[in-house]
Image (cartoon, rainbow, N blue to C red):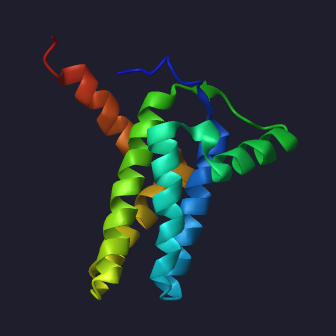
Amino acid sequence: MLRFDVPPVHANATRLDAVITFLVCLAALGLRLPWLMLLLVVAGAVRGFVGHYRCPIHRASLWLVQRIGRPGPKENAGAKMFAAKLLFIASAISVVLWLAGSTLWMVPAAVLLVFSFLEWAFSFCAACWAYMLWYRFRPQQ
């Protein structure tokens, strides 16, 4: 469902958010610092449940892309909020697994690494695609 109760988001700002997600996951996996995933838990919770414009990371991304004059087209925030909720869930699972002492925390971090790469490198948001597909084929009420 398209969301009109929250302001649309700039495409390049959300892509820069994906770069940050990619770098955090890369650092967490490469340097074996799973506590970094806590940043993504907070960012995913704020973006997914409150809105992108309340997230400090997104606000910094928006400021930067506006500063260089390339904010990109505006997109409906509904699909991006769904993707942020999935970010919250995956990063929270990663943190819980880490706190439980399991090395399986790397699996959701690696999944986020791959999908955030697809978003920033190719502008392909798998969660947004699934979101739109769900609303296209679900039974009408």
Q: Is residue 44 above or below residue 30?
A: above
Is residue 68 rendered to the left or right of residue 62?
A: right
Q: Position of residue 111 (x, y in %)?
A: 36, 65
Report the quarter where the C terminus lies: top left
The residue shown at (73%, 36%) is 71
Left or right placement of residue 66 versus residue 40 in this view: right
Residue 1 appears at what percent x and percent y? 35, 21
Which residue shows up at 27% across the image and 30% down it? 133
Horizontal arrangement in the rendering, residue 88 relative to residue 53 (left or right): left
Q: Nearer the viewer, residue 116 or 53?
A: 53
Q: Quadrant of residue 90?
A: bottom left
Up/down of 61 relative to 94, above or below? above
Q: Outermost residue toward the top?
A: 141
> Would you say residue 125 is visible in this rendering?
no
Report whether 100 appears left or right of 27. Answer: left
Question: Is residue 40 in view from this perspective?
Answer: yes
- Residue at 53 percent across and 54 percent down: it is 43
Q: Position of residue 92 (x, y in %)?
A: 36, 64
Q: How many marks?
A: 0
Instruction: Please tell me whether residue 115 is drawn above or below residue 52 in the rendered image.
Output: below
Residue for point 46% across, 50% down: 45
Can you tell which quarter of the image residue 24 is in? bottom right
Q: What x and y, as percent, mark residue 125?
A: 44, 44
